[in-house]
Amino acid sequence: MEKKHIYRVKNWGEYNKALIQRGNISVWFSEDAIQKWAAPKQPGKGRPKVYSDDAILCALLLRAVYNLPLRALQGFLGALVSLLVLSLPIPCYSQICRRAKFLGQRIKRLCKKRKVTDIVIDSTGLKVYGEGEWKVRLYGACKRRTWRKVHLAICPDSHEVVLSFLTENSKSDGEALIKMSKHLPDTLERAYLDGAYDKEGCYRKLYEKNIDPIVPPQRGAVLHPMPWMKARNNSIQEIKGLGGEDGGRKLWKKLKGYHRRSLAETGMYRFKTLFGGKLRARKMAYQKAEIYTKALAMNKMTSLGMPKGKWEFN
């Protein structure tokens, strides 16, 4: 009988406490958020803001973590402030929605780690409109089914999301990477990507950022003379030198550490497990804010504690 590989968590006590802390309201509504609740004074004409961007972001974090509709979110904040005996004004649900639109236009660094050298990127679909999978299986899909594509760049060392990017379902992974590249950290040295990113435009953008792409070239790939295709040419020659497509490709992945790319799929699984496979917002600008907020929340949960273990034979 063949022995099975089983991953055993070695720090279960510590990780269990971190899982409990994820529901602790003080993690999401902290003293820092209370101090930055009011908007700073701004020069110029017009009505000044009452709530800071941090206050709106705090509200959106609570909504993402506790899965609240906007109106219920307003009631939740009001009850929370009342229980804590704080003299903080509560934003209306409509104002939270409007301000989320402007937060969604900002692309910021999500990872707290100062120097990120490696990165893994993957994408997944999130439903906006459409019936559940059970109804589709029984009766078929109707015409009104809309999806969005979320792209997450994750640090394989800290498991934190470095960058989140939302596109329409029709956009390919390569097109998204070209747009994401200008927002990637300057300290990056390597990017672990799957075959969907084996495109000339992706290699060119990574070449301009001095990032070494660890991407398996497609079968039957040929050499190209452009300088930004040098990394791909080297991969093709290395696979041939290791034995060709059959055994050489598998050995090449081991030597390059390509297995780290699977951490991107793990990150996607965690994202959907925590927040589901649907988007609450209906317009792209608001959806970007929703994804940005959920990525921040997932990073916060990651910082509380992660499982540590090793593979064993059983």
Image: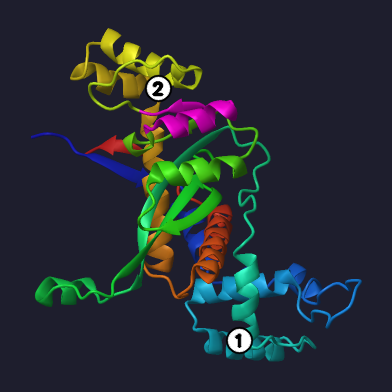
- The picture places residue 82, in percent across and down from the top left corner, at 70, 91
Is 206 magenta? The answer is: yes
Q: Above or below — where is 285 with respect to 301?
A: below
Mark 2 nearby-residue class (10 Å; few <14, some 14–19, many ≥20): few
Considering every residue shown, the one lying at the far left of the view is: 1
Badge 2 is on which residue? 256
- The picture places residue 43, in percent across and down from the top left corner, at 91, 71
Q: Is residue 293 left or right of residue 99?
A: left
Query: Circle 1 sits in a helix, a strand or a loop, which is it?
Result: helix
Q: Earlier in the sequence, mark 2 or mark 1?
A: 1
**Nearer the observer, 80 or 1:** 80
Looking at the rendering, in which quadrant would you find the N terminus?
top left
Residue 103 numbered tag = none
- The picture places residue 57, in percent across and down from the top left corner, at 65, 70
Q: Are marks 2 and 1 in contact (CB under 8 Å)?
A: no
Mark 1 nearby-residue class (10 Å; few <14, some 14–19, many ≥20): few
Residue 94 numbered tag = 1
Between the C-alphas of marks 2 and 1, the distance is 50 Å
Q: Is residue 240 left or right of residue 304?
A: left
Is 148 magenta? The answer is: no
Q: State whether residue 26 appears in this view.
A: no
| Residue at image coords 75%, 71% | 31
**Nearer the observer, 189 or 61:** 189
Q: Give the residues in magenta.
A: 198-215
Q: Mark 1: which amino acid?
A: Ser
Q: Above or below — where is 48 with respect to 9?
A: below
Q: Is residue 70 left or right of residue 215?
A: right
- The picture places residue 268, in percent across and down from the top left corner, at 40, 53
Q: Above or below — where is 313 with respect to 16?
A: above
Q: State whether residue 77 appears in this view.
A: yes
Looking at the rendering, in which quadrant would you find the C terminus?
top left
